[in-house]
Amino acid sequence: MLNPYAPEGIWVKVNLHMHTSRSDGRWEPGAAIAAYRRDGYQAVAVTDHDLLFDPAKEPSVDNPPAPGVQAGGGSVASTAGVSQTAAGQVGQSDAGLLVIPGQEVHLGADRLDRCEYHIVGLGTSSAIRRQRTGQEAVDAIRAQGGLALLCHPLWSDMRQEEMDAIRGCVAVEVWNGVCERLLGRGNSVFYWDSYLSRFDPQPLSPVVREPHHPEQSRRDEPPRPLWGVAVDDTHRYPDDVGSGWVWVQLGERPAGGRPFTVDALLAALRRGAFYSSQGPRIETVLLEGHRLVVHTSSAVAVRFVGSGGRVWSRVTGAHVKSAEYDIAGDERYVRVEVEDRSGRVAWSNPIWVAPLEGSLRLSGHA
């Protein structure tokens, strides 16, 4: 069983793709970040085109002392999402909002790939110049210890083999709000299921492998699970804020307000300990034997989806808050979709079916 979720943990609401006036966004960074703070987010990544946003060097990012943070304590956030970063750590606080360094990397005029890859890099330390191939972009991000996200494959008109050719991405955007607003091409769930249907989880240990050393060839690297993220890709404020986000699970529930680190946030994203949403919440996913039990916020449908995007089972009604599915063992993977009465959807990451052992639980929100 390859399951990304821990038995217990706290949850933070995060947007992983946004732009400011430094590239083609409409608002200055400080105002853009404040819009997310007002909307109840605990963390964001500013990802301007071809430009690293380093919050530690930004005068527009406020860094008030956070409650319970000791001097020299490094990058931490309280269970309420208040955060503070010391020099040399990744991330800064903007009056209670954690800001992660990021950038969106493009291909240059001398690109060799037919596909116009866009790759978001999270947790990078310096700006990355335009690359000739999508793989070079991913490699450059990972060489800095960052996480690479494959952006909007439907908007990019990406062929499946072009998506498969990129090794080392942590996740793919299954929902991009701006691509949907502009062209109606924001939903890339089909690409995700198509990839997962060909991915072989057997070579992987239950703990997802860490990236190879930067000098090691990614071409020879085995495929890894590709998680699914929902993002705003914000350009217009406040219109684009809040169309899609991730709820990230950060370790075990702290005692006495113990803080968590920004490194823990990036590590949780790497191992898939999150789900994506346009609104609904996935409160609990409990696997006992062959039965998968789901508890959610009020929904009109809960779907259990497997290989190729096949819906193995669905529960519908006016106020669905729980659903069960008996796993047959031939699904390869099962992920959960929750749809509310407004048509908004939440997506869990895939849980690999075999072997079925023990009991695993995705704990609900506080």
Image: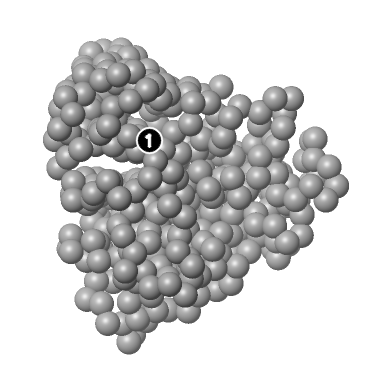
Q: Position of residue 151 (x, y in %)?
A: 35, 58
Q: Is residue 141 left or right of residue 179?
A: right
Q: Is residue 152 above or below residue 3?
A: below
Name the kind of residue labelled 1 in the image. Asn
The image quadrant of residue 243 is: top left
- Residue closer to the observer: 5 or 130: 5
Q: Position of residue 306 (x, y in %)?
A: 19, 35
Residue at the location (77% across, 54% down)?
86
Q: Is residue 307 left or right of residue 43?
A: left
Q: Position of residue 23 (x, y in %)?
A: 50, 69
Q: Is residue 351 above or below residue 73?
A: above
Label 1 belongs to which residue? 3
Residue at the location (72% across, 28% down)?
257
Q: Is residue 262 left or right of residue 213?
A: right
- Residue closer to the observer: 296 or 167: 167
Q: Is residue 248 visible?
A: yes
Q: Is residue 58 above or below residue 177?
A: below
Which residue is outermost to the right? 71
Residue at the location (38% across, 59% down)?
169
